[in-house]
Image: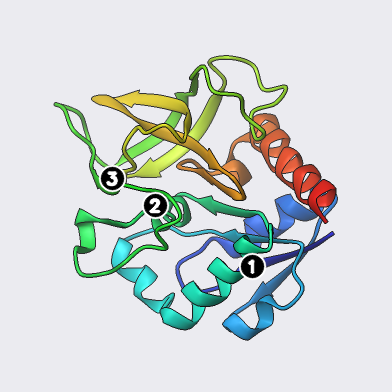
Amino acid sequence: MNIRVVDYGAGNLASVMKALAFVGAAPIRIADAVAIGDANALVIPGVGHFGATRALGPDWREAISGAMSRGVPLLGICLGMQWLFNGSSEAAGVPGLGALAGTCSVLRGDVKVPHVGWNTLIRTAKPSVLLDGVADDAFVYFTHTYAAPITGDTVAVTTHGSQFASVVERGPAFGVQWHPEKSGDVGLAVLRNFVEFARASC
């Protein structure tokens, strides 16, 4: 299973690649858009400030959008999920991929930020590929200050101060605001679902 993991200097690549290998993928780290090649799937990890996604310039956006137009599934993790949207108020001049509509913003409410630690996924009524077989109110591990809006593409929300989108799916675009590589059996189940979806899409 040929999965390319994009290295743009802001990802927890070692842990993500180890988890992907554990669920049966053959992850390959890439640092050049040309290396997307004939990937069966793409993963965009990421931690930190949205400004770091500036490294994913026009060449990356064109190559990734082209792959998705061919049906290649893409999974964005944490900052990588936020990058799937139009952008973020954290770095207003930096464009996202635009695969999902909306702008990410700081978590609202009288709560501590960043939001770090375990919290629950609350399923929406929308069917989900990633959450197939995952129990309702499953706990997963978060670390973030900004989050994506709740839209028609949201398949799970989480509450920290207010609700935000914690799992999104639209066509070949998938995103999780939390870290599956740090979320035990639930995280591995979600990664396995993504890998199996990608394998069936080949």
Residue identifier under label 1: 67
> Which residue, as the protein is rendered here, is positioned at the far front?
69
Q: Is residue 109 above or below residue 190?
A: above
- Going from N to C along the chain, the mark reached first, 3 or 1, is 1
How many angstroms separate mark 1 from mark 2 (CA)?
A: 19 Å
Between 143 and 61, the one lying in front of the other is 61
Amino acid identity at mark 2: Gln
Q: Quadrant of residue 148?
A: top left
Q: Is residue 80 above or below residue 28?
A: above
Q: Which image quadrant: the C terminus?
A: bottom right
Specify the label residue 82 is tagged with.
2
Q: Residue at x 49, y 38 (%)?
A: 168
Q: Is residue 142 left or right of residue 89?
A: right
Mark 3 is surrounded, within 10 Å at the Cα level, by few (under 14), some (14 to 19) or many (20 or more) other residues, namely some
- Going from N to C along the chain, the mark reached first, 2 or 3, is 2
Q: Quadrant of residue 177?
A: top left
Specify the label residue 145 is tagged with.
3
Amino acid identity at mark 1: Ala
Between 193 and 24, the one lying in front of the other is 193
